[in-house]
Image (spheres, rainbow, N blue to C red):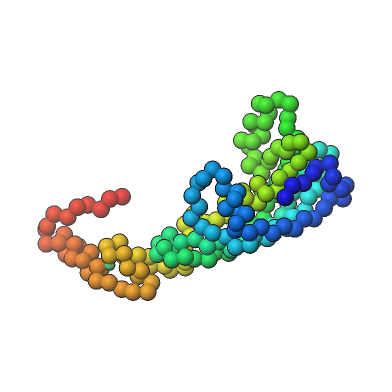
Amino acid sequence: MKITVSKIPDGGMNLRAEKDGKWFQGMIRNGSPCDFSLERIEVACSVQRMKENVFIEGTLSTMVEAPCCRCLEPTKIPVGASFKYTFCPPPADSREEWELKAEDLDFAYYEEDTIDLDNLIFEQVVLQVPIKPLCRESCKGLCPHCGINLNTASCNCRTETFDERLAVLRGFQVKPEKH
Ligand SMILES: [Zn+2]
Ligand SMILES: [Zn+2]
């Protein structure tokens, strides 16, 4: 979805957009693997213009499906974000550009009278997806020894860890834990 800056009315405008998971996959151009999938993304924003500068403020919501980082079960996570962006025409001096970019991540330049909202939506979704998704706070994860899902089953590996501790008590050599 593209906004033509010179066509933004003086009183601003409101936009609504819907994107789907396929669109999101298509936006990943660098070939970086994506270990989550998305349902419909809903975006609502207001667009204001002051001379050449454009202010975009809005919210987005979607449902992300990703493997739980502990038990690897597919997990649905509601994702919501509000965002604010300021767009300006590119500066004549390229050094100025660098300084502004370093200071303010919500600041961007537009070119040729056009702001591409798709990039903005994509960026926001990527920012909001949790780095370590959890199916639940109390997820017990997988047993590090046998790989069983400890949320739904139990195994006998824990007693082995206990035996190691007993070994210490008995004065046997046990590898120190890595930190
Ligand atoms: Zn889990
Ligand atoms: Zn086990």
Horizontal side, residue 117 vs residue 146: left or right? right
Residue 168: image location, x then y, percent:
16, 59
**Observer able to see residue 93:** yes
Horizontal side, residue 29 vs residue 137: left or right? right
In the image, is residue 138 above or below residue 43?
Answer: below
Kindly identify the residue that appears in the image at 42 percent across and 67 percent down: 139
Kindly identify the residue that appears in the image at 62 percent across and 54 percent down: 23
Kindly identify the residue that appears in the image at 31 percent across and 73 percent down: 154
Kindly identify the residue that appears in the image at 12 percent across and 57 percent down: 172
In the image, is residue 145 above or below residue 109?
Answer: below
In the image, is residue 93 above or below residue 26?
Answer: above
Horizontal side, residue 4 vs residue 168: left or right? right
Nearer to us in this view, 150 or 6: 6
Residue 151: image location, x then y, percent:
38, 72
In the image, is residue 32 above or below residue 78?
Answer: above
Residue 173: image location, x then y, percent:
13, 54
Nearer to us in this view, 115 or 154: 115
**Observer able to see residue 80:** no
